[in-house]
Image: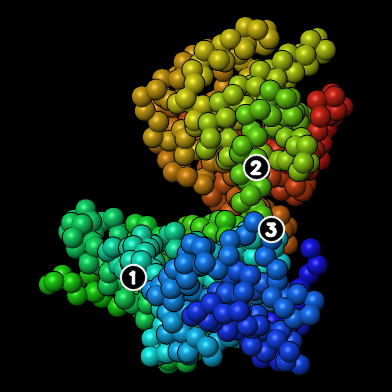
Amino acid sequence: MRERAVSGYPGGTGRAPGTTLSAVTERNEPTNEPAAGQDDASGPAHTVGADTADGPARPGGRPGPHGEPAARGRGEPDAGDGSAASLRDYRAAFQAAHVPLAVLNRDGLVLAANPAFGELVGAAPDDLVAATAADLTELGTDPRIWAAYREVLRGHSDRLRCTRRLKHPDGQFLWAEVTVEPLPDEDCVLLSVADISDRHDLLARLRHLQMHDPVTRLPNRALFFERLAGALESAAFEQHGTGRVGLCYLDLDGFKAVNDTLGHRVGDRLLSAVAQRLTHCAENPDGRGAVRGGHGGHLVARLGGDEFALLVEDSAGTEQLAELAQRVLDALQRPFDLAGQRLSVSASIGVVERAATGTTATGLMQAADTTLYWAKEDGKARWTLFDPERNAHRMTRQALSSTLRPAVDRGEFTLEYQPLVGLGDGRAKGVEALVRWRHPQFGTLSPNRFIGLAEENGSIVELGRWVLARACRQARAWQLARPGAEPLFVSVNVAVRQMWDSDLVADVAGILAETGLPPALLQLELTESAVMGSAGRPLQALQALSEMGVRIAIDDFGTGYSNLAYLSRLPVSVLKLDGSFVRGFRSQEHPNPADETIVEALVSLAHRLGLTVTAECVESAEQAERLRRIGCDTGQGWLYSRPVPPDRVCDLLGAARPGA
């Protein structure tokens, strides 16, 4: 079908109303004469509902080649039968209908309109002939509706039904359902308008109830995400805006205590009061009534519980969001007077501001939630700005945590060993096993990158068991490879959770039996905070391991309780001084006498309790010499060797090192 030009929308190419379209006439009685205007220079007249000598003329019917009405087909009834009466009935119904109706040609121009339609637009029906229907019913203001409307006019679509907001001649607005559909067997379309204002208002009230929080009367989570998605979409395509969005995501600190102590009724009143202050902050972004970023205010929503959000569309940058967050904090710190109760609350706020392009609602909320957690973690009662680097670190931690357990089964862990050297003779007495993770994505990771995560998610039990078995098997291999030489003990770190969540005694006994390593060649290192104050199962496990012949060492001694008196009641045989004490020994020209005094006192007391002392982080010969003079037994650090693979340990055995 050939595309017809359509007027009524900017840029349309249709005929101007009243210039080339013939007049539309209506006749109340049949006639045998040609239609008026037939020989007019402007062309033959189109008639709607007019009868001819041969029969009723069809609305919009085409005239003959010489201007006469179109001939009726063979067998058509003449004007005297019931068809003419039916047509008059249709015409009468069209005129009397309370629903506004208009017949349009394929160019979208009015051929005929009933009185109800004239009343709707404030004009006489005859004056509407050749008017542009799209202008009368607001069909040209929405590009999508306009495109669908043109499809109906072209005959490519059977119906258009849409809702439009129209202005009545009395100045009132009404909501109308506009329907456009082709007339059967006619080259024209019927436009009808139904007033649905009452239904629209009811649906609007129902939607308001559905999309707003009943306690605070703020938009709820559903409406917030709807507005957020719309803001992202419009900001990405808006040419005159900043193309950016901002979000302040806040949570009240300690709100649960209000509900628990004063009841939910007071809690609801507090939430309502908080909502009022947030709304005031959003309506006056800079605190002086002026508007920043081109908006008269920002969307405030309650997302659930004591969580609120302030959405800043077309934001002006992080500075604007930071100012808004600080204003919110200041507003909430003022006490609330609620029915005789004077309450003080604070809030933690996560602030995110970014370009709309490439941003999703889910991604923005995830960033805001993460930033809110940082604000809580950093001490509450503050706002925190989203930090991509910090978030990348968090994402890395999450990725590592989720892959820790399967990494053990995949064999991604390996052990390196660092020698423990006697300060008296400079010979290796043992080695400490240090686990490494050969991650397929992040490369080789040291223990401080994943041990804490393993303790959090419980995978430390399985990983610790693997480290213990591998280290014992390696120590036994060294013993067998050096018959007659002084055996080398291996020291393995044990996490607190291994003491509680596994049968450590049974694990050690089974591994020693399986590998054949003598218990005296195994040393287990536990942190000071894990050993001090031990009672119940942990203390029983330590005693059982000591009775088995396994040595127990306290790692990083001096950073926790440092309760030497308690050591006499524990089955501990070795103290490993934290490296912070040894660092003061670095400078020979400017020694720190306090550090030397503390270390000397610790070594003396440990020896009186029958314990040996190992100094960590020994990096220079001067440090080693001073530690040897104080009486420290063994040293560990880069002076002797960095952690090395097991095949290089044999090269270090028996070799004298600096400081001996």
Secondary structure of the residue carrying tag 2 is helix
Give the residue displayed 62% in from the left and 6% down from the top. 513
Amino acid of disc 2: Ala
> Which mark sits nearer the N-terminus, 3 or 1?
3
- Work out whether residue 377 or residue 210 is closer to the camera in this orientation and state it: 210
Give the spatial CA distance, label 3 vs label 1.
Answer: 50 Å
Residue under label 3, please give it.
Answer: 74
> Which mark sits nearer the N-terminus, 2 or 3?
3
Secondary structure of the residue carrying tag 1 is helix
Amino acid of disc 1: Asp
**Marks 1, 2: nearer the viewer:** 1
Depicted 214 relative to depicted 132: above or below = above
Residue under label 1, please give it.
Answer: 198
Residue under label 2, please give it.
Answer: 399
Residue 139 seen? no
Residue 265 seen? yes
Depicted 49 relative to depicted 620: above or below = below
Considering the image in quadrants, where does the N terminus appear?
bottom right
- Neighbours of disc 1 within 10 Å: few (<14), some (14-19), many (20+): few
Say which mark, if any, is on residue 320.
none
Depicted 446 relative to depicted 415: above or below = below
